[in-house]
Amino acid sequence: MAKSRMINTSFWSDPFIQDLNNNEKLLYLYFLTNERTSICGIYEITERTMAFDTGIELKKIKQTVDTLVHAGKIKRHKNWIYLLNFSKHQKSNPSVEQGIKRAIKELPEGIFDKLSTDSPQHGLPEPELKPEPEPEPELKLKDRESTPAQKMRTFINSIREKDIKYKNLLRNLQEKGISEAIGIVELDKFIDYWTEKNKSGTKERWEMEKTFEVERRLITWLSRIGGFDGKKKRKVTFIS
């Protein structure tokens, strides 16, 4: 039975989409809707299949994929694709969350780790390997991060870069009942929602709020998930 994929009608008004050329628009929409898509946004597909299904010349597929990788919309490891914003197209409920966990467990060994970390991406230079620093004992903002806006910008960068602060936060959330798989998905959803730009493209959603305390907003966001205990052990806080 064919899977049904519903794409938000605002897809075409997204400033990112409007700046893409025809091949890039088609391939990105194809990644979101083709029959190989998985509930966790990770699936295997070859360049030859992409070319055959879309009609884009095979020699242009790699260039088009690289554009989407550099734009931070996908990650790629060999023939595996990870749609970083795929979760925002899905409703959050226990059934979906269980489906995501199950889909991740069913992936071949090592694929999720390679795609969810800073592993080499197709078409990009391999990063220099550096020893990972020890986790900091407390997840807190430095004193200089004094305003809510500064804290939010620090938080956005940490989630997008998947740095040590992000990994510490995932550990913090696990102490509060959120699995790593669900934490990764929900943090991406949180960022996708609050960084959506207004129609003029001048401000993100969070910047239009009168006040915005990122820790409180995230706790409220996560409170709808079964098993989350926002008061357990320590506050949900972040380092800069």
Image: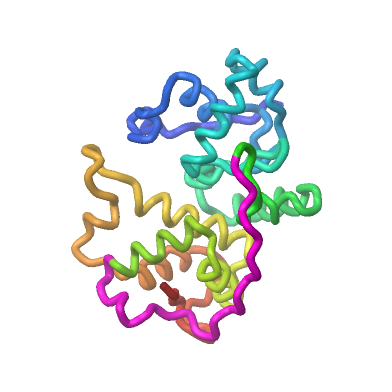
Instruction: Name the residue at 35% across, 68% down.
Output: 214
Read off the magenta span.
124-149
Residue 150's place in the image compared with 125, above or below, is below
**Where is the C terminus found, in terms of image quarters?**
bottom left
From the viewer's perspective, tell me whether residue 49 is left or right of residue 232.
Answer: right
Q: Residue at x 41, y 27 (%)?
A: 20
Asked if residue 114 shows in the view, the reply is: yes
- Please provide percent x and percent y for residue 19: 36, 29
Magenta span: predominant SS is: loop
Q: Position of residue 106 (x, y in %)?
A: 77, 49
Is residue 136 part of the magenta span, yes or no?
yes
Could you tell whether 233 is left or right of 106 in the image?
A: left
Q: Residue at x 35, y 54 (%)?
A: 194
Vertical relation: 162 (above or below) 173 = above
Please tell me which residue lies in front, 166 or 172.
166
Q: Position of 60 compared to 12: left or right? A: right
Q: Residue at x 54, y 60 (%)?
A: 162
Q: Position of residue 52 (x, y in %)?
A: 67, 15
Residue 104: give x, y in percent of width and height.
71, 51
Answer with the quarter of the image where residue 113 lies.
Answer: bottom right
- In this view, 235 is above or below 95: below
Q: Which residue is nearer to you in this view: 62 or 85?
A: 62
